[in-house]
Image: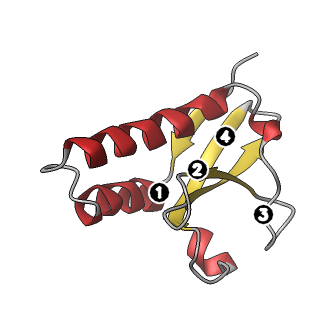
Amino acid sequence: MAYLVSLTARAERDLALLYVQINAEDSEAALKWHRGFKKAILSLEEMPNRYPETPESDKFRHLLYGNKPHIYRAIFRLLEKQKQVEVLHIRHGARRRFKRADVA
């Protein structure tokens, strides 16, 4: 059964900021990459358990997207009873580990 994928306001802002940072409006390659990342996030509707738990907490999982050194993390939590995936935060993979306040 498919899960419902939703993005928090924070994750929506992160994704919009990433669009600007990579200059997706003026670069066909960047736009293609950004669309691929969004597609990967939406693919969480099928088997979200396939992604590993985050090093910071076993309550969260993360999807890694891109190639070194440009790897981004979509941090999400799985709400099994509701059959929902809630994407909490999107960040560059090289950033320091997140804190609870980063995903709240």
Question: In the figure, residue 48 lies in which quadrant?
Answer: top right
Instruction: Name the residue rendered at 58%, 50% in the picture.
Output: 87
Q: Earlier in the sequence, mark 1 or mark 4?
A: 1
Check disc 1 and give the amino acid type. Answer: Ala
Instruction: Describe the element under mark 4 as helix, strand or loop.
Output: strand
**Callouts 4 and 2 close, C-beta under 8 Å:** yes
Q: How crowded is mark 2: few (under 14 residues within 10 Å), some or many (20 or more)?
A: many
Q: Which mark is residue 87?
A: 2
Instruction: Describe the element under mark 3 as helix, strand or loop.
Output: loop
Of residue 58 and residue 70, the one placed in the foreground of this image is 70
Q: Earlier in the sequence, mark 3 or mark 4?
A: 3
Check disc 3 and give the amino acid type. Answer: Thr
Distance (Cα) linking label 1 and label 2? 6 Å
Instruction: Describe the element under mark 1 as helix, strand or loop.
Output: helix
Q: Which mark is residue 31?
A: none
Q: Earlier in the sequence, mark 3 or mark 1?
A: 1
Give the image location of residue 85, x and y in percent. 66, 40
The residue where tag 4 is placed is 85
**Callouts 1 and 2 close, C-beta under 8 Å:** yes
Of residue 51 and residue 13, the one placed in the foreground of this image is 51
Q: Earlier in the sequence, mark 3 or mark 2?
A: 3
Q: How crowded is mark 4: few (under 14 residues within 10 Å), some or many (20 or more)?
A: many
Is 101 left, or right, of 78 in this rendering?
Answer: left
Give the image location of residue 61, x and y in percent. 75, 54
Q: How crowded is mark 3: few (under 14 residues within 10 Å), some or many (20 or more)?
A: some
Distance (Cα) linking label 3 and label 4? 15 Å
The residue where tag 1 is placed is 11
Q: Which of marks 1 and 2 is nearer the N terminus?
A: 1
**Of circles 3 and 2, which is in front?**
3
The residue where tag 3 is placed is 54
In the image, farthest residue toward the right: 58
Check disc 2 and give the amino acid type. Answer: Val
